[in-house]
Image (tube, helix red, strand yellow):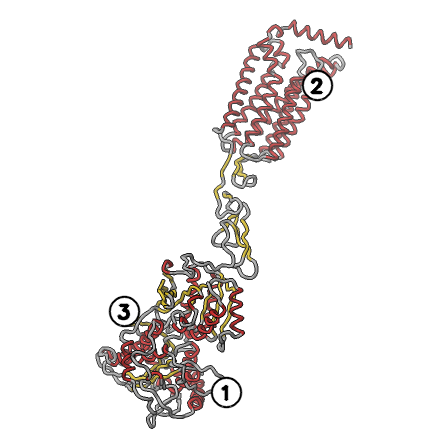
């Protein structure tokens, strides 16, 4: 396939070459050619392009009035100087001389002509393709140039089939790194791939995420804009406006006015201009005309330090200019070489020698009109580009040095084929004025960038290096203190669509740009992770966060501790109750056979006091961190103890009513009840029923320690799972029924003898019980904190204290304070009085 492609090219190129050159002879200027053992070709823009419509592919006449390009002139001289320096060297190519053919590529047509002229056979207008490229030779062994991507793409495509090395000094487009398309292309300027990465990192360094992007027509600007957009967008940088300056742009034309209008409307402080210097000049003249000031301009390498831009009238008022440039280097002796060229270059251009070929783009009349006092200024931008030319020539020389076997101080003079030299150039690795010259697999150099800032001292312009950028990988090192922002401010200008949200506020994107957003606080229990500013993430189970939080906090674990003041008060009250219960049991034991104790139930009182003590002991399990034994004993033990007490109290009240009111009316029932120990049987059955309820509660709805997270966002409540269980409700229901039964029996006995009438005290204690538990359930419905167990203990203490006070305290009072009432005569008199009243009724 490659052979047939090459064959077709061989048929077409002679026709195109002859058409382009019109097959004529012309005058040439001194210094465009130099004979030598091996020839190099150089492509330089000594004149600006002639922007006009062409109807046929004829070569542009470069040498036109007012079109001289001083920058290209310096590069032209840099190549001449490099070849002369190498020829004078005794170390590099010792017995070999290099020659050159230099061409002015002021336009695309001139560039095509120069490339075809290089490929033509010596003294003819024919280009031949050999069947075997290994034996294909040309009159030049390598080309240096051209200066921009558009020209370089054309030249590289034409030279690729011949594998003639083409080393560009200014074409930086990433497209040229494609070796399948441009196999013989190399360069001494870093690829735009790295430049784009440096620009994006520069934007990130200063926090500029809302930018405008301007490119120039052509591969350099359009591909640069595309690459920058593709790299910047995933990194959070939004492009509010982008456009391309057309090739035919003129200052003040409708297209430029429209671009200026959109830039003003975009509200971006930072504008990246990825443009060649020619269209950048048109653009900035339009900027000055539109009065677009107070901006930060990011300059691409092609115009960052070009005097072509800094000479625009009024440019110093546009704002701050930061730029990316190749590392600043100088070619020692170049300035003196140019001066000697001016001194030696006298006379008009000479005519083309008979039998040789000269071209219309080997002519520069202005080059011979200079004096040592009036010649193009060799500025920093041109000097850096000249160094790239210098490197390119030396790279070819070192490749030849290796190919010709010059290590033995004598070079062979065998034939040199382009593909052989191309291989050797890829392998070069040498020091040139302390700088390493080498190429990677894509033909790109291993270089550095500088970050510069423009500075103005009145009308005088200068730039300052504020940082550097190493490549592979790209890393920036910037000294921000060196930058003087526009308005003499030391504050970095902001370029954002929306200012950053406060901590704990997430972004809600408005419109199509993620840089434009509304700030909303994170909900309670969530926090804003800095890795994702658009989404609030939930805190962990053991953490909490208030509304609008940037982090989570550990929850406080709470339970009713032993050492808290309220715990100490309740523990003291409970201990006092236990002492009273024990004291009462001892008092009743000492007066067991007295009428007061016997009327209170006799030995049954000890069961009642023991059940109250059982309930009181359960309160100790409410304090401290809940454990499994504590949860198992807490509510069931209290409920069972209180159920036994209520069962005894109920049957005691029922027996008094039965003895005094129904023994004579239903004697059969009374005798059956008495003979079968109905009172004891009721207490046993009632207590057994409640015990079964508690066992079922512990088995089916087992109270266990749990950590409660829902009630309070910042707390973890340690508690037992019991309050809302079915077992608790069943046990509470049974105690409620017993309480109602006790109340009913006590109320029926309200007319009994005074010594046996317990209705008032029992009614009071039961009412206190009801009120306490109603208050507890009301409290638990509105408060679920760590003090709920304390409320539970308080309610239980109130219930037990009320029950003890209502039933036992009056009897203790009689035993201790009114012993005269604790005798048989007093009780018999009371019974007789009740009998008399009942009989009269």
**Residue tagged by mark 3?**
434
Q: Give the spatial CA distance, label 1 vs label 3.
A: 50 Å
Q: Give the spatial CA distance, label 3 vs label 2.
A: 115 Å
**Residue 463 in sight from this viewpoint:** yes
Q: Position of residue 508 (x, y in %)?
A: 55, 55
Residue at the image position 42 percent from the left and 89 percent from the top:
21
Residue 498 vs residue 405: left or right? right
**Quarter of the rendering occupied by the C terminus:** top right
Disc number at residue 55?
A: 1
Q: Residue furthest front?
A: 458
Disc number at residue 747?
A: 2
Numbered disc in front, either 1 or 3: 1
**Quarter of the rendering occupied by the N terminus:** bottom left
Q: Position of residue 135 (x, y in %)?
A: 35, 86
Placement of 624 over or under 573, stated as above or below:
below
**Residue 424 in sight from this viewpoint:** no
Residue 719 vs residue 195: left or right? right
């Amino acid at each position: 396939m490659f052979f047939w492609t090459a064959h077709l090219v061989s048929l077409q190129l002679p026709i195109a070459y002859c058409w382009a050159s019109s097959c004529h002879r012309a005058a040439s200027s001194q210094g465009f050619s130099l004979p030598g053992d091996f020839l190099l070709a150089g492509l330089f823009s000594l004149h600006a392009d002639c922007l006009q419509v062409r109807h046929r592919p004829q070569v542009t006449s470069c040498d036109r009035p007012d079109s001289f390009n001083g920058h290209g002139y310096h590069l032209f001289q840099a190549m001449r100087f490099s070849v002369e320096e190498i020829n004078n060297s005794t170390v590099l190519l010792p017995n070999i001389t290099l020659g050159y053919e230099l061409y002015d590529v002021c336009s695309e047509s001139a560039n095509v002509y120069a490339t075809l002229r290089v490929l033509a056979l010596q003294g003819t207008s024919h280009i031949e393709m050999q069947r075997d490229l290994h034996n294909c030779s040309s009159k030049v062994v390598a080309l240096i140039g051209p200066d921009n991507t558009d020209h370089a793409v054309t030249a590289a495509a034409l030279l690729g089939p011949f594998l003639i090395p083409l080393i560009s000094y200014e074409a930086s487009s990433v497209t040229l790194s494609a070796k399948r398309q441009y196999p013989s292309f190399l360069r001494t300027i870093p690829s735009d791939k790295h430049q784009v990465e440096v620009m994006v990192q520069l934007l990130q360094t200063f926090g500029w995420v809302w930018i405008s992007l301007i490119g120039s027509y052509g591969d350099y600007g359009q591909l640069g804009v595309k690459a920058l957009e593709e790299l910047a967008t995933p990194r959070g940088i939004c492009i509010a406006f982008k456009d391309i300056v057309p090739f035919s742009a003129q200052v003040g034309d409708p297209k430029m006015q429209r671009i200026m209008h959109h830039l003003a409307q975009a509200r971006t402080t930072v504008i990246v201009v990825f443009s060649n210097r020619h269209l950048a000049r048109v653009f900035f003249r339009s900027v000055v005309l539109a009065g677009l000031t107070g901006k930060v301009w990011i300059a691409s390498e092609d115009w960052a330090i070009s005097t072509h831009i800094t000479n625009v009238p009024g440019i110093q008022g546009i704002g701050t200019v930061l730029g990316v440039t190749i590392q600043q280097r100088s070619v020692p002796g170049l300035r003196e070489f140019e001066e000697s060229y001016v001194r030696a270059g006298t006379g008009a251009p000479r005519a083309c020698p008979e039998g040789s070929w000269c071209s219309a783009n080997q002519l520069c009349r202005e080059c011979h009109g200079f004096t040592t006092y009036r010649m193009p200024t060799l500025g920093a931008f041109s000097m850096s580009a000249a160094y790239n030319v210098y490197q390119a020539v030396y790279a070819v020389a070192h490749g030849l040095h290796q190919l010709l076997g010059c290590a033995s101080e004598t070079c062979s003079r065998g034939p040199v084929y382009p593909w052989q030299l191309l291989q050797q150039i890829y392998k070069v690795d040498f020091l040139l004025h302390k700088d390493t010259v080498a190429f990677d697999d894509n033909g790109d150099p291993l270089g550095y960038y500088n970050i510069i800032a423009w500075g103005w001292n009145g009308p005088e312009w200068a730039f300052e290096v504020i940082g550097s950028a190493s490549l592979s990988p790209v890393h920036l090192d910037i000294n921000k203190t060196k930058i003087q922002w526009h308005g003499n401010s030391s504050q970095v200008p902001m370029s954002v669509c929306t200012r950053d949200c406060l901590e704990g506020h997430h972004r809600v994107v408005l419109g199509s740009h993620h840089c434009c957003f509304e700030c909303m606080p994170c909900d309670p229990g969530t926090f804003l992770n800095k890795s994702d500013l658009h989404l609030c993430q939930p805190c962990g189970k053991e953490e909490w966060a208030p509304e609008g939080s940037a982090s989570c906090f550990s929850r406080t674990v709470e339970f009713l501790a032993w050492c808290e003041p309220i715990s100490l008060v309740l523990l003291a009250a409970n201990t006092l109750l236990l002492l009273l219960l024990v004291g009462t049991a001892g008092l009743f034991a000492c007066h067991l056979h007295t009428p007061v104790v016997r009327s209170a139930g006799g030995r049954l009182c000890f069961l009642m006091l023991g059940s109250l003590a059982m309930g009181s002991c359960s309160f100790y399990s409410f304090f401290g961190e809940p454990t499994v034994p504590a949860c198992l004993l807490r509510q069931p033990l209290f409920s069972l103890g209180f159920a036994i007490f209520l069962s005894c109290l109920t049957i005691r009240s029922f027996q008094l009513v039965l003895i005094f009111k129904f023994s004579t009316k239903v004697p059969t029932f009374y005798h059956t009840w008495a003979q079968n120990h109905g009172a004891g049987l009721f207490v046993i059955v009632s207590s057994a029923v409640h015990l079964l309820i508690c066992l079922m509660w512990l088995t089916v709805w087992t109270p266990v320690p749990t950590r409660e997270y829902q009630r309070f966002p910042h707390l973890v409540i340690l508690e037992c799972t019991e309050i809302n269980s079915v077992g608790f409700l069943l046990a509470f229901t049974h105690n409620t029924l017993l309480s109602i039964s006790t109340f009913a029996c006590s109320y029926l006995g309200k007319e009994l003898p005074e010594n046996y009438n317990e209705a008032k005290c029992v009614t009071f204690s039961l009412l206190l019980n009801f009120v306490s538990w109603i208050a507890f359930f009301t409290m638990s419905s509105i408060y679920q904190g760590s003090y709920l167990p304390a409320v539970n203990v308080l309610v239980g203490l109130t219930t037990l204290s009320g029950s003890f006070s209502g039933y036992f305290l009056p009897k203790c009072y009689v035993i201790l304070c009114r012993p005269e009432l604790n005798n048989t005569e007093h009780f018999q008199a009371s019974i007789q009085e009740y009998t008399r009243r009942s009989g009269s009724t």
